């Protein structure tokens, strides 16, 4: 079975997710003790998508997040570069498209908001992706990212790094069709930058009013930002 490495070659990452697509959502819920559902609900509140808005859900996988974010009446599009993941989510009834985060197949200013839920750490170039996302979001539009992060409280951080990430790899061996993929996912979680560093990367890509909120002791964090309105770009 395929697994990616931390150089995050796009073809390897896509092949890895193709291989785990069938049981991915089930394995995630199992390994997070169901917290993944709570995190998506909180992300939906932070996104605050309204009827009539167009929302890009990038790295959407099977579209489980897209369906959550569309409940308020917004038109939400699931985009992912893993065809296997998209095929596994066809039953969700949300619009889907294959897309590379670094070369999005959308016109400038096509969306009112963009969101990424547990996917940005798999991009080969985080800043370049954030710049490309800004291109397709309207001025004044929103960016909401939900991703693993760094617990700020030292004892929790120690437990997270020493035990939880290792346990994730072990659990993946029993709950996934591709255990090696979960070794990569644990490695990518350990290597991912902390909340402030990610916020700085978002700001350096041209987004403004960057803020974050910790969830579950900082194991996960939601980052939110705004694309500068036209009158502030001059």
Image: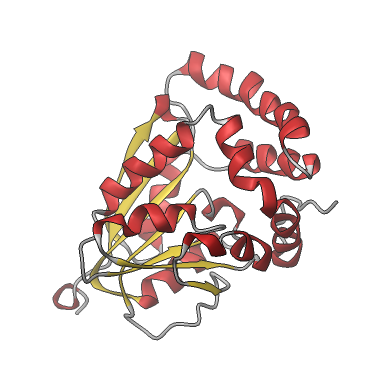
Which quarter of the rendered picture does the C terminus lie within? bottom left
Horizontally, residue 112 falls left or right of residue 150, namely left
Horizontally, residue 222 falls left or right of residue 23, namely left
Q: Position of residue 99 (x, y in %)?
A: 56, 74
Considering only vertical position in the picture, is 45 above or below 203? above
Considering only vertical position in the picture, is 127 above or below 177? below
Q: Position of residue 164 (x, y in %)?
A: 62, 23
- Residue positioned 43% across, 19% down in the render: 153
- Where residue 125 sits, quadrant-wise, is bottom right
Furthest-top residue in this view: 155
The foreground one among 137 and 58 is 58
Furthest-bottom residue in this view: 107
Horizontally, residue 149 falls left or right of residue 180, namely left
- Residue positioned 45% across, 73% down in the render: 132
Considering only vertical position in the picture, is 15 above or below 41? below
Q: Position of residue 231 (x, y in %)?
A: 14, 77
Q: How many marks?
A: 0
The foreground one among 192 and 68 is 68
- Where residue 220 sits, quadrant-wise, is top left
Horizontally, residue 61 falls left or right of residue 210, namely right
- Residue positioned 67% across, 29% down in the render: 168
- Residue positioned 52% across, 42% down in the render: 193
The foreground one among 125 and 160 is 160
Furthest-right residue in this view: 1
Q: Position of residue 11 (x, y in %)?
A: 74, 67
Colour scheme in use: secondary structure
- Where residue 71 sits, quadrant-wise, is bottom left
């Amino acid at each position: 079975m395929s697994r990616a490495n931390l150089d995050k070659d796009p073809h390897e990452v896509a092949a890895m997710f193709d291989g785990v697509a069938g049981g991915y959502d089930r394995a995630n819920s199992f390994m997070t003790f169901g917290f993944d559902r709570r995190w998506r609900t909180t992300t939906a509140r932070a996104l605050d998508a309204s009827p009539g808005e167009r929302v890009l859900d990038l790295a959407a996988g099977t579209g489980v997040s897209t369906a959550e974010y569309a409940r308020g009446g917004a038109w939400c599009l699931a985009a992912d570069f893993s065809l296997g993941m998209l095929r596994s989510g066809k039953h969700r009834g949300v619009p889907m498209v294959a897309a590379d985060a670094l070369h999005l197949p959308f016109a400038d200013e096509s969306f009112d908001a963009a969101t990424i839920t547990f996917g940005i750490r798999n991009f080969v170039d985080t800043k370049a992706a954030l710049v490309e996302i800004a291109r397709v979001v309207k001025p004044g539009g929103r960016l909401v990212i939900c991703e693993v992060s760094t617990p700020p409280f030292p004892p929790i951080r120690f437990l997270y790094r020493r035990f939880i990430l290792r346990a994730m790899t072990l659990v993946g061996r029993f709950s996934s069709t591709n255990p090696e993929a979960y070794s990569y996912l644990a490695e990518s979680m350990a290597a991912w930058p902390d909340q402030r560093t990610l916020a700085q990367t978002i700001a350096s890509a041209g987004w403004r009013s960057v803020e974050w909120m910790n969830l579950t002791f900082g194991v996960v964090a939601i980052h939110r930002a705004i694309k500068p309105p036209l009158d502030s770009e001059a």
